[in-house]
């Protein structure tokens, strides 16, 4: 392709405060329509908003965790728009003095590091939700508005147009998600819409510095949709440019059923919103001391955690996966603290544990096998009580039973056979029954050993110690 894709993301994240940004209404998701509302979030005349301090705290923490500068003097502005989902007819947001600006995060693309710059992070209120009587607004005879979500606090994280592929945009969004989870300011449940992105995509001739005309896709709430929409949009724009056409600056929607983006409306420039300072809220003044206290209160972040695991001997790839979610990283640390080997812990967590969690639709926080029992099982492999293969059976049993791995191994008779005379008996039998493989091996085809080892393992139901089997077999065959 003769174009370079240029991508910038605006990520909206709902903050996990108990109450809304400018009133005391609860933020609970999924409540009955219009039960968490009051005169303030309904925009009734004559009422005044009050800023929720928690929101400012969470926004500053998000700024610090993404290497932003914090505006010590920040203020709210009114962004005017006319739509029933915000009854005031403006959204209280931030314009020229956002709470945080000029940050960056690092992403990893196939082992290569890239820096993505953040333009700004600002605080704002979420809008309500239209509930149509039909499936879409077009085939509905009426629509209700649910104002429960109106006034739920959001931060909007705006990136510079620093990404150049769907994979980079995904890695960036994953990094932001994991940082917000680590600092515990958002639930980041994309399927509930509390983490969603507007994606801006343009193309320019390779080598050109000038930005091309962009289109914007709003409210993308899954990583798959993010990648698919970007790839589709890159192809669509390239085709238009190849034909000598012009890209129209517009807002498009992603249609996941059809796998295409569709034009929605032409895109306004900022001045159309007629931003003006919010007169009902005082500016937010933060001191250096307060900022430093917030900085000190931050936990170990994903990149630091990853570096620590690599330093302790885990490979980069595994360390990246383990630390992508805070819950998984904490589980991993616990397994290692209970005495399991680092690499084995990572393998079991990324392998059987993740597989079982996925198929049962569970998260690691409510895994039926806790860190302590997994560590005990890994130690049984390390001390030779069970083989790695048998361990898979033990693990499957642990998944459905609260018993300790020791008890399971004992009850099911799964202890590894390390008694050489017992193994030798089986080996003799296998040698007698497989003259062809024996002959091949003796004739120089060393690979034939594998088949014989396999036979021994089969006859012992996987319980023979594979190292001992190998050794004894070799000895017998070479004799
Ligand atoms: P808005 O979309 O609200 O008008 P901005 O103009 O600040 O706001 O841009 C929003 C996002 O679009 C930012 O993430 C920015 O990096 C990105 N962006 C701006 N221009 C382009 C472009 N030509 N191509 C791709 N992304 C762009
Ligand atoms: Zn309210
Ligand atoms: Mg935008």
Image: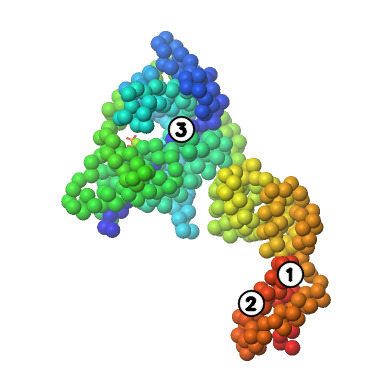
What label sits on residue 451 in the rendered view?
2
Badge 2 density bin: few <14, some 14–19, many ≥20, Cα 10 Å: few
Position of residue 248 in the picture relative to residue 192 (left or right): left
Residue at mark 3: C-beta within 8 A of ligand 1: no
Is label 2 within 8 A of ligand 1 (CB to nearest ligand atom)? no
The x, y position of residue 106, in whole percent, is 47, 49
State left or right for residue 349 relative to residue 13: right
Mark carried by residue 409:
none
Which residue has dot 3 on it?
155
Q: Is residue 10 visible?
A: no
| Percent x, y of residue 202 | 29, 46
Q: Could you tell me which residue is drawn at 40 percent across and 26 percent down?
A: 131
How many neighbours does mark 1 have within 10 angstroms: few (below 14), some (14-19), or many (20 or more)? some
Tag nearer the camera, 3 or 1: 1
Q: Is residue 367 above or below residue 24?
A: below
Image quarter for ligand 3: top left
- Which residue lies at the image location 31% right of the left edge and 50% below the top edge? 234
Please tell me whether mark 2 or mark 3 is closer to you in this view.
Answer: 2
Residue 196 position by quadrant: top left
Q: In terms of secondary structure, where does tag 2 sit?
A: helix
For label 3, count other residues whose C-alpha is less than 10 Å away and answer few (under 14), some (14-19) or many (20+).
many
The mark nearer the N terminus, 3 or 1, is 3
Q: Quadrant of residue 26 in the image?
A: top right
Task: Measuring from the top left, give residue 9's x and y in whole percent.
Answer: 39, 42
Q: CA distance from mark 2 to mark 3?
A: 60 Å
Task: Kindly identify which residue carries mark 1.
Answer: 460
């Amino acid at each position: 392709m003769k174009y370079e894709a240029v991508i910038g993301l605006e990520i909206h994240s709902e903050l996990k405060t108990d109450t809304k940004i400018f009133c005391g209404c609860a933020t609970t998701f999924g409540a009955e329509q219009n039960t968490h509302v009051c005169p303030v979030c309904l925009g009734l005349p004559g009422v005044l908003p009050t800023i929720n301090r928690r929101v400012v705290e969470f926004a500053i923490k998000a700024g610090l965790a993404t290497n932003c500068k914090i505006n010590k003097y920040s203020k709210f502005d009114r962004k005017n728009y006319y739509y029933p989902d915000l009854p005031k007819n403006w959204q209280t947001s931030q314009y020229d003095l956002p709470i945080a600006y000029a940050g960056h995060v690092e992403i990893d693309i196939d082992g290569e590091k890239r820096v993505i710059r953040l333009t700004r992070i600002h605080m704002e209120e979420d809008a309500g939700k239209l509930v149509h009587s039909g499936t879409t607004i077009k085939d509905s005879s009426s629509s209700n508005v649910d104002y429960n979500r109106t006034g739920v606090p959001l931060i909007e994280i705006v990136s510079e147009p620093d990404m150049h592929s769907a994979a980079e945009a995904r890695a960036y969004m994953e990094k932001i998600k994991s940082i917000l989870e680590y600092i515990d300011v958002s639930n980041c449940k994309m399927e509930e819409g509390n983490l969603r992105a507007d994606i801006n995509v343009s193309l320019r001739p390779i080598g050109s510095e000038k930005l091309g005309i962009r289109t914007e896709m709003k409210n993308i709430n899954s990583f798959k949709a993010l990648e698919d929409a970007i790839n589709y949009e890159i192809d669509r724009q390239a085709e238009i440019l190849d034909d000598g056409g012009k890209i129209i600056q517009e807002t498009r929607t992603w249609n996941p059923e059809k796998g295409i983006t569709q034009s929605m409306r032409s895109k306004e420039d900022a001045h159309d919103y007629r931003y003006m300072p919010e007169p009902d809220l005082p500016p937010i003044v933060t001191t250096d001391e307060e900022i430093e206290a917030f900085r000190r209160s931050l936990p170990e972040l994903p990149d630091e955690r990853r570096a620590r695991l690599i330093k302790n001997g885990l490979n980069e790839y595994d360390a990246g996966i383990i630390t992508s979610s805070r819950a998984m990283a904490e589980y991993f640390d616990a397994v290692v603290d209970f005495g399991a080997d680092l690499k084995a812990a990572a393998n079991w967590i990324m392998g059987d544990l993740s597989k079982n969690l996925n198929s049962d639709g569970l998260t690691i926080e409510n895994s039926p096998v806790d860190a302590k029992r997994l560590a005990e099982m890994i130690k049984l492999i390390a001390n030779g009580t069970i083989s790695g293969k048998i361990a898979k059976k033990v693990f499957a049993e642990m998944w459905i039973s609260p018993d300790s791995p020791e008890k399971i191994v004992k009850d099911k008779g799964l202890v590894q056979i390390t008694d050489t005379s017992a193994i030798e008996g089986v080996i003799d039998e296998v040698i007698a029954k497989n003259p062809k493989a024996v002959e091949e091996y003796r004739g120089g085809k060393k690979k034939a050993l594998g088949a014989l080892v396999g036979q021994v393992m089969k006859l012992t139901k996987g319980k023979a110690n594979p190292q001992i089997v190998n050794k004894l077999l070799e000895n017998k065959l070479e004799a």
